[in-house]
Image (cartoon, rainbow, N blue to C red):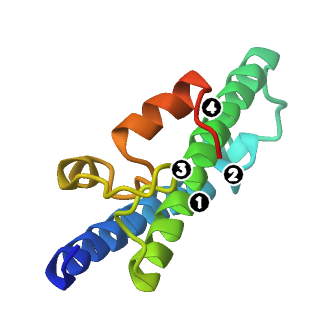
């Protein structure tokens, strides 16, 4: 992979990283830092109804799972940026062949070529 391609993919990864950080900030600010009353807009001294509490808990749990997935994606992007900087970006970690550019355009943080990714998903990739 030439320097121009590496620069292009580094910029894509950084852009994706910034988007993820904004989304994770949203989850932290809007979901996790609000109390049940704040989230409902209720400033009264009355207790919150049990059904409302259950709905709020369910929404917080969904947000947690989404934030967790975003966190994993952020980790993969950071790992890809390390590979860009150490020169191993674009090399499959399974078979050590070059990952095709169209795959990297779609999944810039890819660490496996499409064949090795299929094998990993089927449970047949040996490390």
How far is mark 1 from mark 4, CA to CA? 15 Å
Q: Which numbered disc, 1 or 3, marks the residue closer to the eye?
A: 3
Where is 51 relative to 125, above or below? above
From the viewer's side, name the closer residue of 59 and 97. 97
How far is mark 2 from mark 3, CA to CA? 15 Å
Horizontal placement of 46 versus 86: left or right?
right
From the viewer's side, name the closer residue of 44 and 115. 115
Task: Kindly state the secondary structure of the residue where label 1 is placed.
Answer: helix
Neighbour tally class for label 1: few under 14, some 14-19, many 20 plus, Cα within 10 Å: few
Residue 29 is marked as: 1
Residue 62 is marked as: 4
How far is mark 2 from mark 4, CA to CA? 11 Å
How far is mark 2 from mark 1, CA to CA? 6 Å
Task: Kindly state the secondary structure of the residue where label 4 is placed.
Answer: helix
Neighbour tally class for label 4: few under 14, some 14-19, many 20 plus, Cα within 10 Å: few
Q: Which residue is mark 3?
A: 70
Residue 2's spot in the image, x, y percent?
Answer: 19, 79
How far is mark 4 from mark 3, CA to CA? 12 Å
Residue 45's spot in the image, x, y percent?
Answer: 82, 40
How far is mark 1 from mark 3, CA to CA? 15 Å
Q: Which residue is mark 2?
A: 32
1 or 3: tag closer to the N-terminus: 1
Q: Which numbered disc, 2 or 4, marks the residue closer to the eye?
A: 4
């Amino acid at each position: 992979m030439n320097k121009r391609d590496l620069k292009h993919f580094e910029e894509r990864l950084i852009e994706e990283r910034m988007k993820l950080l904004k989304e994770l900030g949203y989850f932290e600010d809007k979901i996790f830092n609000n109390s049940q009353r704040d989230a409902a807009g209720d400033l009264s001294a009355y207790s919150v109804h049990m059904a409302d509490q259950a709905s709020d808990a369910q929404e917080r749990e969904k947000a947690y799972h989404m934030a967790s997935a975003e966190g994993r994606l952020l980790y993969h992007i950071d790992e890809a940026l390390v590979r860009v900087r150490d020169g191993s970006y674009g090399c499959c970690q399974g078979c050590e062949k070059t990952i095709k550019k169209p795959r990297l355009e779609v999944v810039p943080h890819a660490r496996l070529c499409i064949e090795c990714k299929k094998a990993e998903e089927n449970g047949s990739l040996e490390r």
